[in-house]
């Protein structure tokens, strides 16, 4: 028992040191900083799987204190509050051998709640809304670009058109800030799930596998949420109900993204063994950067949630 406790303490100390080193890299190393921040939760995830939540919490506490001393308290609060909970949730799912989809959903929920909590804590401690601060940075960058174009002699009517387009885009970005939080949580969860599985397998742990892309099927409820979002956008726009309009736009883009993923899964199934996987992903990349085709594929994916085209095509083949 004493040996187990000593081993847990040793690994906890080592992994806490690794989290601090990764945080330092995230704060001070150019270019690699964003990547380092994304994988910062990995040591915590591994610690939960190997020794349980208690040792992970102690490690996070120690790492947070050291980070506050070496970097700054605000950065330490943001990273610990925003990234530790989803890592603990992922580690718990791996430790309990939960299905991959369930593990991802639990971690995604933890990531969204944690990010909102981190933003609220920063706002309470500084009085500054971090989301508004990001918008101000975008606006300053755009104003600097406009000034540069003016010195280059760009015609005033062209500048006016650019300002008008930016104003509309800026308004849309501000409206979609809740979706940005959700997507940030999804990216963090996805990266740590993929990398965490590889690390744990190297350490000899069993981890759940995601189904192949061909088998990905999202809930039918997403299709109905998409329909409700269209109605909400119409009502919000026509009756100037700002809260309804904002919520509906966020649901619209979120469900459209889900439809795109479902559409990619459907294409993957239909084109399997017909073209190489490299060619398949090249086609998907072309579709992704083409807004109209991407939206069409999203619609196909949304309707696939109801009609299950893959099942119909396989039935015809048989």
Image (spheres, grey):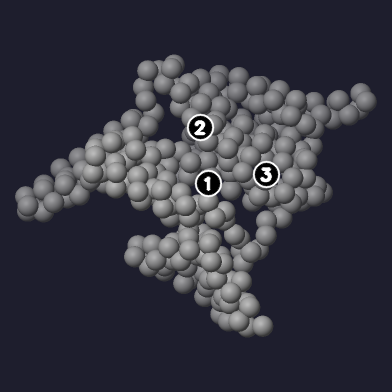
Q: Are marks 2 and 1 in contact (CB under 8 Å)?
A: no
**Residue 230: horizontal and vertical position, in percent?**
36, 51
Kindly report which numbered mark, 3 or 1, lies closer to the viewer in this rendering.
Answer: 3
Answer yes or no: is residue 41 visible: no
Circle number at residue 130: none
Which circle's residue, 2 or 1, is located before the other in the chain? 2
The residues bearing labels 3 and 1 have C-alpha atoms spaced at a distance of 15 Å
**Foreground of the two, 195 or 272:** 272
Helix, strand or loop at disc 3?
A: helix
Q: Residue at x 39, y 48 (%)?
A: 229
As helix, strand or loop, the secondary structure at mark 2 comes to helix
Q: Residue furthest left?
A: 156
- Relative to 206, does residue 277 appear above or below in the rendering? below
Q: Give the Cα distance between marks 2 and 1.
A: 12 Å
- Name the image quarter holding residue 65: top right
Tell me the residue that label 2 is attached to: 115
């Amino acid at each position: 028992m004493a040996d187990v406790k000593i081993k847990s303490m040793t690994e906890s100390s080592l992994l806490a040191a690794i989290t601090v080193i990764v945080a330092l890299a995230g704060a001070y190393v150019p270019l690699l900083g964003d990547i380092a921040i994304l994988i910062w939760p990995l040591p915590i995830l591994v610690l939960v799987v190997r020794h349980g939540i208690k040792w992970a919490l102690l490690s996070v506490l120690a790492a947070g204190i050291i980070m506050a001393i070496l970097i700054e308290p605000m950065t330490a609060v943001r990273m610990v509050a925003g990234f530790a909970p989803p890592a603990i949730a992922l580690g718990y799912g791996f430790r309990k051998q939960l299905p991959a989809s369930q593990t991802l959903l639990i971690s995604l929920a933890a990531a969204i709640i944690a990010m909102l909590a981190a933003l609220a804590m920063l706002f309470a401690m500084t009085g500054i809304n971090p989301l508004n601060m990001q918008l101000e940075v975008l606006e300053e960058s755009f104003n600097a670009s406009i000034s540069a174009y003016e010195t280059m002699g760009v015609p005033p009517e062209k500048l006016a058109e650019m300002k008008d387009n930016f104003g509309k885009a800026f308004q849309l970005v501000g409206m979609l800030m809740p979706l940005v939080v959700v997507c940030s949580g999804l990216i963090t969860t996805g990266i740590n799930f993929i990398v965490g599985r590889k690390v744990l397998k190297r350490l000899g742990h069993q981890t759940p596998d995601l189904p192949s892309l061909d088998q990905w099927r999202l809930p039918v409820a997403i299709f109905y949420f998409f329909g409700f979002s269209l109605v909400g956008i119409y009502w919000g726009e026509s009756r100037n109900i700002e809260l309804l309009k904002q919520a509906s736009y966020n649901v619209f883009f979120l469900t459209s993204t889900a439809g795109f993923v479902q559409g990619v899964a459907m294409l993957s199934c239909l084109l399997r063994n017909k073209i190489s996987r490299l060619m398949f992903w090249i086609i998907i990349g072309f579709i992704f950067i083409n807004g109209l085709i991407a939206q069409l594929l999203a619609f196909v994916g949304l309707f696939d949630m109801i009609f299950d085209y893959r099942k119909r095509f396989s039935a015809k083949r048989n």
